[in-house]
Amino acid sequence: MIPRELLGVGKVPGHSGHGKELRCYRHDRDYSIWIDGIELMSSRVHGSEQALAELALDKLGPKAAPRILVGGLGMGFTLARALALVDEQARVDVAELVPEVVTWNRELFGHCAGNPLQDPRTHVVVDDVGKVIAGATGLYDAILLDVDNGPEGLSRPANNSLYNRPGLVAARAALGRGGVLAIWSSGEDETFERRLRDAGFAVKAHRVRARITKGPRRIIWVATRA
């Protein structure tokens, strides 16, 4: 049996004490990131992360030199798919709170997603995506959020502020005319869907498979300014 190898540990800002650490592992040729004994993401399973970019940019439609924000770098699959779907003049900002996640993408498993951080259209911001959104009035054509487990925070309770009404109103303000907000979630949340509508969005929920054709169902909400 091939053992699982711990490659790195990263602290989640905003937590003190034991338990809130991201741990990066390698098992054979696969990589994964865990928190508190729960696997957050894996290089084996990334279909829904790619679908997040596909659904958002399909809704946006053809646009020259779009400005995109990806909230949560993860293992780079959403970023890579977004880059594949936009033109050479696009700019894709990616906000990642944990610096070690950026380092792991650069040094350990970036090749799994095609090394999207090496693309000159990519601009990394090591910060809370909520702060990036708050300072970006009318700036973005699309915002893609894959932060935590969706509206129910797992790794960091402060992430909930992205998904409450003020956070959604801020996201709406950060979008330009015709802008799209797309949000990944591990499960259904009718209350959150109503909250999106109350914040001024027209919303469609898409149910996708974790591995594209199989695996657990994930939810991607695609929202546009109503």
Image: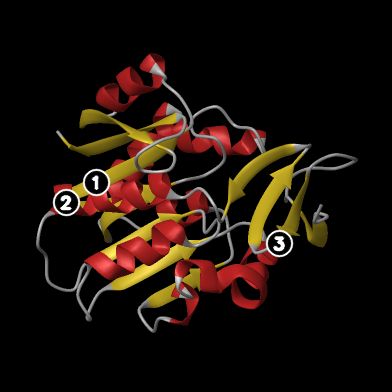
Tell me residue 87's x, y (percent).
19, 75
**Of label 3 and label 2, which has the lower sequence position?**
3
Q: Which residue is farthest left?
A: 62
Residue occupied by mark 1:
55
Label 1: how many Cα within 10 Å (few below 14, some 14–19, many 20+): some
Three-letter amino acid code at the position of disc 2:
Asp
**Secondary structure state at the residue bearing disc 3:** loop
Residue at the spot 84% in from the left edge and 39% down from the top edge: 19
**Of label 3 and label 1, which has the lower sequence position?**
3
Q: Is residue 157 left or right of residue 48?
A: right
Residue occupied by mark 2:
58
Q: CA distance from mark 2 to mark 1?
A: 5 Å
Residue at the spot 31% in from the left edge and 73% down from the top edge: 91
Disc 2, disc 1: CB below 8 Å? yes
Q: CA distance from mark 3 to mark 2?
A: 35 Å
Residue at the spot 49% in from the left edge and 34% down from the top edge: 150
